[in-house]
Image (tube, helix red, strand yellow):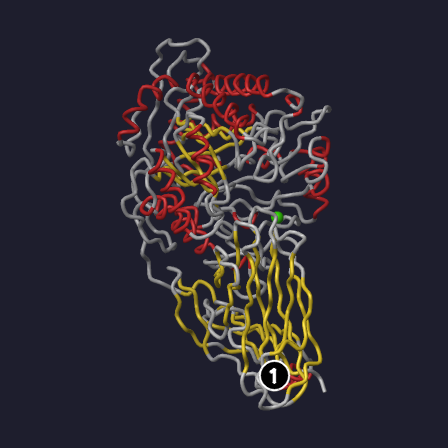
Amino acid sequence: MKKMRRNSDRNKRSTGRLGLSVRGRWSIAALCLALLMAMTALAGCGSATKEETGDGEDEADSVNTIATVNYIPTEKIEGSTLYVEKVENLADDFILGMDASSVISLENSGVTYRNFDGEEEDVFQILAENGVTHIRVRVWNDPYDEDGNGFGGGNCDVDTAIEIGKRATQVGMKLIIDFHYSDFWADPNKQMAPRAWEDMEIEEKTEAVYEFTTEALTAMKEAGVDVDIVQVGNETNGAMCGETIWFNIQYLMQAGSKATREVFPDAMVALHFANPETAGRYADYAKKLDYYDVDYDIFASSYYPFWHGTLENLAEVLSEVAETYGKKVMVMETSYAFSGEDYDFSGNTISDDSTTIVKDYPFSVQGQANSFRDVVDTIANETTNGIGVVYWEGTWISVGGSSWEENSALWEKYGSGWASSYAAVYDPDDAGKYYGGCAVDNQAFFDTDGNPFESLRIFNLVRYGNEVELKADAIDDVTLYVDLNGTVELPETVDAVMTDNSRQAVEVTWDITDEEIEAMYAGGVNTYTVTGEAAGMTATCYVAMIEYNFLTNYSFEDGDLTGWSVTDNAAADELYVEDKVTDSLTGTCHMHFWSEAQNTVDFDLEQTVEELPTGTYKYSISIMGGDAGDDQEVYAYVKIDGEIVATAPMTITSYGEWDTGTIEDITYEEGQEITVGIHVRCQGTGSGAWGKIDDALLNSAAE
Ligand code: CA
């Protein structure tokens, strides 16, 4: 094989295997196909590396030859309008992959894809032409009901994976095979055994994993699929194939790994996990894998930037595994939205309505490319032994109908939605209830008609850079808090997000009348959306009419305890202001507490206000958390001149369940000292009481 750009040690090592997979007996049909493809390539593609493989040697009768034309460019694609800062030190064999598991179902549903010249073309060729090096495909054991109706999500069984594998191999890409060891989706919330294995004890199930993996991989090998990585389990966060203890899970992983070593001795074995943002999670998994001596090469992570913490944290937790155990690491799934819209009448994982996600890039084609570029940079330059990044389902677009009903008919028939109603026989509570279409059509690299976005070229340009002139790509939203007795003053400039994700102030013209502003004063506590025009784009200002809050740093947005004082009565392990949008009631910060041992959460958080006008006031504060136990004493309180005059009981229940303690009718006279606070004492269940406090409000009460 002459993969020209692949001149690293790893490639040298794998030459033998590549030779094996492409040799074999040439059939007349294969020869014709090869000639046809070579002619097509010569006619249509000037810059790609063209190569035919197969030397006609008889090696194994059962191994087919796939005629390969490598379309992956070895030079920069010129002429793109996409801004790309080059990722330095990117190894020639750095994996820039794409999961494209739903393609066959989409094509069966009538979806077609076009290249940048607007010509209909094989989607795998389009991906290769733009620099995608690997195609990832998931494998479910049996995603069909008894009547042969597919569960959806691409109906990805072994045969589907082989079909995808052959097509990707034909155009020069390698395969990452993603075994879920389930009949449908496996992820951190769901690791169901296939129906055929449900009643098996662990010994039998281990054998089943070995047999299934061996047979599937052998079939792929016989079909000539160029397998580079085999993933044993998908997002196996402490569960896999119905097993929930590591003593059992490791047997299954060992079985999948053993099968891989035997069928594809030069392929790498990957294990795949999610939620790098959870402190200690990956270190714990890696330690267990080491303890059980599980044979694997790659510790892989999902990284969805809107949910999974910072890139710095990702690099840190993966590097720790790489350095401690000598493993390779990579991002096996990532994505970002090119827009906040939905295109197929079936809601998406992230959208303009998402309120608790981290949005470090605008939802735009450029933002999608920048996000991917930064993940690649992090794995290549900030992470020890980082070998690649795979984008998840960048080809999953709408099936194109003009109504939910029209699309649903296609999802049901061809499995092109995330789940069909037929999945109810296997997963009645989730897929069986909420089946529907594509949840990531706003994260694809193609529009609804199958035309590629400029961002697809990131797979090539990330190696070379493309620092075209900066321009404004999006406008940051503005939020304005105005006291009901204050004045609405809309800003004269807003921040434009430039194509390199930097900010520049630009002038804005708001579309609002004096009458509309008057109505805001009259409307009480309320939030209004004002739009305007800036740098040729729509600017948005949210005007929140609020009651004046006499507390400083009421939502902890200063990022510290400015204005507040803490009395820690029992030495909690963690007690500080945390910046984490997903755990905050509003804004991005909140007061965080956690303690591992029982009876070590016992503290008061309070703020004293000076110079309040005489009058009647109300006070409220909110808390949420978990593992607090039944023995808890949590209340909001008000002190006048150091004496508690009123309390409001509160309860810590579970994640996301905020409880607000409110104290009304607080009488205050000038000259007094008023202090408001929250008292938290809980025994804890023994696994670490924790919680979050946010949004303390001290307002003047109505007359
Ligand atoms: Ca959708």
Residue 659's place in the image compared with 67, above or below, is: below
The image quadrant where one finds the N terminus is top left
Which residue does the image show at 64% across and 69% down from the upper left?
Answer: 636
Residue 287: percent from the left, percent from the top?
Answer: 43, 34
Residue 604: percent from the left, percent from the top?
Answer: 56, 67
Residue 102: percent from the left, percent from the top?
Answer: 56, 36
Q: Is residue 447 left or right of residue 228?
A: right
Residue 248: percent from the left, percent from the top?
Answer: 55, 26
Residue 309's place in the image compared with 175, above or below, is: below
Q: Nearer the viewer, residue 606 or 506?
A: 606
Query: Neighbour class for label 1 at 10 Å: few (<14), some, many (≥20)?
Result: few
The image quadrant where one finds the C terminus is bottom right
Report the residue marked by disc 1. Answer: 513
Q: Secondary structure at mark 1?
A: loop
Q: Is residue 499 left or right of residue 409?
A: left
Count of labels in the image: 1
Q: Nearer the viewer, residue 471 or 136?
A: 136
Residue 587's place in the image compared with 438, above or below, is: below
Residue 427's place in the image compared with 659, above or below, is: above
Quarter of the figure with residue 340:
bottom right
Quarter of the figure with residue 77:
top left
Q: Nearer the viewer, residue 71 or 486?
A: 486
Q: Amino acid at mark 1?
A: Thr
Q: Is residue 126 visible?
A: no
